Amino acid sequence: LDAASAFSEIEFLKGLASLGHTIIVSIHQPSSEIWALFDKVGFMTGGKAVYFGKAGQDILDYFETAGYPCPTFTNPADHVIKIINRDFPGNKADDVDDLIAKFAQHEAKLHVEKKEAEHNEVREGEEAKVETDTVSGSEKEEYFSGEMERPNWLSRFLALTHRNFLEVTRDPGIYGVRLAMYTMLALLIGLMWLNLGDQKDFSSITSRTSLLFYVAAFMVFMSVAVLPFFIWQRDVFLRERSNRAHGISEYVLAKWVVSIPGIFLLALFTTLLVVLLAGLNGFGVYLADLFLSLMVAEAFMA
């Protein structure tokens, strides 16, 4: 990639990192603009770490302490790569080995300081605990029992509804595939009974009965197309239920409620194609009947 494209890519990854994602990249000769976007950097030579830590002023201070200050107006990445690469003229292998040894000592020192800080925090916590008032027996038993208060049924239902809604919006294929299937089948049925009308003779009544049978049988039966999506989520459901995160009733009801807009859209597209092409009357009754039938089938699939 050229410099502008590389900067655009890293800037996009920086945005993902700011949202809480962990981004790990390997990059060759980053520009100064790209370098300014990094939070942490690592340098290795011969499979051994020479530096790993924060970018910016931290790495400059470290190498200055190690005896390799970065010249003014020099890209820190270029400076570090130059001094740790054994292939560059003027770089001695012993100097690079010395940098590796210094970083190992630096890491050991940081590890010791971290352990000491943790030890001090534990000791201060124990001292503070002695000074605090003792908790009553019932409160102490409740606190240390490890039992967390389970959210009520409504809270669990709302949380599951929100999660299911996000799943549907992020994966439009859940209803996109079904919409394509229903549209093609409705178009086929509408063309088979094109301009059937609403006459009351025996032939017309028989034809309308056949049309309604096809719609009731095939449209409702095709609700089975949603079953694979539930199977994919089965392991998640079993794990969450075993951990008492939620029960069956709120899980199934949340699935059913979130499916209402999608099912209505399927029923509307089907009704438009069948009723208008076949010349039937009672658009609203047909839509309501098909919608309710699909909702019942969807509930069985959930």
Image (tube, helix red, strand yellow):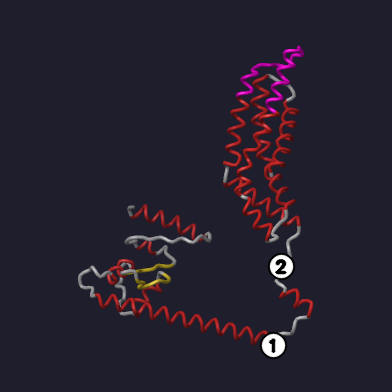
Looking at the rendering, the stretch of residues picked out in magenta corresponds to 188-215
In whole angstroms, how far apart are the C-alphas of marks 2 and 1?
Answer: 27 Å
Of 78 and 136, the residue lying toward us: 136
Of 94 and 69, the residue lying toward us: 94
Which three-letter amino acid code belongs to the residue tagged 1? Answer: Glu
Residue 234 location (% of width, % of height) = 63, 50
* Picture layout, residue 109 above or below residue 247: below
Q: Is residue 233 left or right of residue 64?
A: right
Local SS, label 2: loop
Q: Earlier in the sequence, mark 2 or mark 1?
A: 1
Q: Tag on residue 131?
A: 1
Quarter of the image holding residue 270? top right
Q: Is residue 7 left or right of residue 178?
A: left
Residue 107 included in the magenta stretch of the image? no
Local SS, label 1: helix
Q: Is residue 95 left or right of residue 166?
A: left
Which three-letter amino acid code belongs to the residue tagged 2? Answer: Met
Residue 149 location (% of width, % of height) = 73, 66
- Please report the residue visible at 72 percent of the width from the left and 13 percent of the height from the top: 203
Residue 232 location (% of width, % of height) = 60, 48
Of 231 and 17, the residue lying toward us: 231
Crowd band around label 2 with a 10 angstrom C-alpha radius: few (<14), some (14–19), many (20+): few
According to the picture, the residue beneath numbered tag 2 turns out to be: 148
Furthest toward the left, the residue is 89
